[in-house]
Amino acid sequence: MVESAVRSELAPLHRLLGRIGRKRQRLRLTIGILGVLVGLIFVALGLFTLDWLLGLTIAQRVVLILVAIIVAYVASRRFILPWFIGRESELDLALLVQKHFGIDSDLVAALQFEYPEAVEWGSVELEQKVIRQVAAQAQQLPLIEDVPRAPLRKRLLASLCGVTLVTALVLLFPEHVAVFVKRLMLQNVHYPTATRIIDLSVNGQPVSWDKAGQTLRCGVGATVDIRVVATGRLPEQGQALFQIVDQRRNLRIPLVPVENQPADSPAVQRAFSGKWTGLDAPCRVRMTLGDATSQWIELSVVPPPVVLTWFAFQDPLSENPEYTMAVGNLQISVREGTQVIVGLASRSELKHAVATIGLLEVPLQRGIPQHLEGLLSAISQGAAASIPQTSGPINSRLPSASEFWWLDPAGTPLERVESPIRIRFQVRDQFGLEPSVPVEAFVGVRPDYPPQIAVRTVTRLVLPSAHPTLFVEARDDVALREVRALGKVVQADGEEGGQYEWVLWQGNGPPTRTLNEKYKVDLSQLKAKKGDKIELTVVAEDERGSDRPGAVTQADAIFLEVTDLAGILAVMAEADRESAAQLQEMIDRQLDVGGEQ
């Protein structure tokens, strides 16, 4: 009961001390927050200054960030943390009020007399008197302004300066600030420089000059061709630094200006180039122009792709419907009119394959034609003994784990080979590497010569219905298709009469290259009359496939005179008289040689 009465009497004092405590606590929190802001700003500015001036590597940045964290931790424990964790009790605030107003210690004593154990300290009447006196005095005390304003002013000023400096950096050098943030996140980027690299390519492959961890693959013994385009403050030349890891040596290649720059390139830009021939070990390279430096680019050495050519073709005159395969050959020879499918086989994965035939460029298709799948599968499995081939055991020439590409002959000279064809292939694998030697193929043509034919007959004088015999000799380098005889009547006045055609022979069986036969022709089909002449012409046509006409050769024409039976007898009699005269002449010559008997 007494304790509650005492507290009610000192309620004004408690309210006063509570208001003073809350105000001081807010000011302490403000000072602490400003301290955190000042610390962050100046730590960031320090990191930025050191990183920009020294161009720290990732490892150095990690160490610097760790040092900054340690320094910030130590400074915060001493200068910032006390402002957050510090608490003032009512007795502390009462002492502060006593000191501020210059009053005696009754204020603190009255607060202590509120404790339950104060009854045992002495006269209760005296304690109550002190409490009533302090309660009356507390109602007249104003809210004191005795707060720590000096640290507040200092930290507020430092915060304003730091924020102003950071704002100026962001507005004046936004690129630097953005790069600094990325570098704090341990990204391997560079600050803007007076010389700026705007384009970089190695062996024709575009490369991000400010991106770390890039790897390019080059062939063994290849030439590393570097081209850099820069702007800004342009130096007279730059350099490419090659670090050969295995051999622990450095090689510097100058980057000189390219004199024959494109005419449309801006005058504020300049291209620099440099070459290193004979790359034989893994290395890394970095380009430097003025104060601009690119990231390290890893160069790994890989063997160039091994690419073989293959051909598939079918002889149009062959009875065998199977395709003939030639794998690994650089050239083949086919019959004129043959369709040829050409392709590539590679051990490694190809990304680009284009065939150039004259002025025609045709991209190759990945895979193999459906009708050749079984044949190539048999080759891959080594079953070459039963496969038609043009040379050698072709299964031994086929690369293991091959990838196939093929050229569709439709719309190209390979659809029907009429003349020799040279094919050049542009090939790049998945790493952009080309074969060490150019890939070319040649398709030769075996010409199909026209047939040869000769015809003769025994008699030149015939009846209108005669069946004279024609002795025919014909030959061809491939096969004969047909032999025909063409008859035509030439009348006595020079006008032409009836015509007729006889098919003497047709090649329906196995290919026939040579023909030596005799054939009779029925002249009654011409309806010739006595005094007319019959012109007989025999032609031979060779075989060139079912979809192509054959070449035709015409023999010398044979002229027959049409007469009647009397005319033939007269000719025979004349022949007999000539025979008797010849016989007499022979006897006379014999007598001249041997003399009289």
Image (cartoon, rainbow, N blue to C red):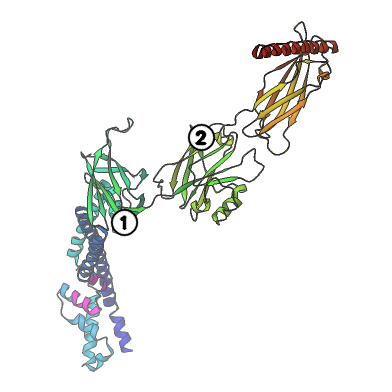
Label 1 sits on a secondary structure element that is loop
Residue depicted at x 50% and y 53%: 396
Among numbered discs 1 and 2, the one appearing first in the sequence: 1
Q: Nearer the viewer, residue 182 or 292?
A: 292
Q: Position of residue 435 (x, y in %)?
A: 41, 46
Residue behind mark 2 = 421
Q: Quadrant of the image for the N terminus?
A: bottom left
Label 2 sits on a secondary structure element that is strand
Q: Quadrant of the image for the C terminus?
A: top right
Q: Position of residue 328 (x, y in %)?
A: 49, 47
Label 2: how many residues lie within 10 Å, few (<14), some (14-19) or many (20+)? some
Q: Real-space Cα distance between discs 1 and 2?
A: 55 Å
Q: Is residue 95 magenta?
A: yes
> Can residue 563 be seen in the rendering of this structure?
no
> Can residue 70 be seen in the rendering of this structure?
yes
Q: Is residue 272 magenta?
A: no
Q: Nearer the viewer, residue 310 or 538?
A: 538
Q: Is residue 293 left or right of residue 437?
A: left
Residue depicted at x 78% and y 21%: 468
Q: Position of residue 77 (x, y in %)?
A: 22, 71
Residue behind mark 1 = 187
Amino acid type of the residue that numbered disc 1 sits on in the rendered structure = Gln
Q: Nearer the viewer, residue 416 or 266?
A: 416
Label 1: how many residues lie within 10 Å, few (<14), some (14-19) or many (20+)? some
Q: Quadrant of residue 199?
A: top left
Q: Nearer the viewer, residue 136 or 445?
A: 445
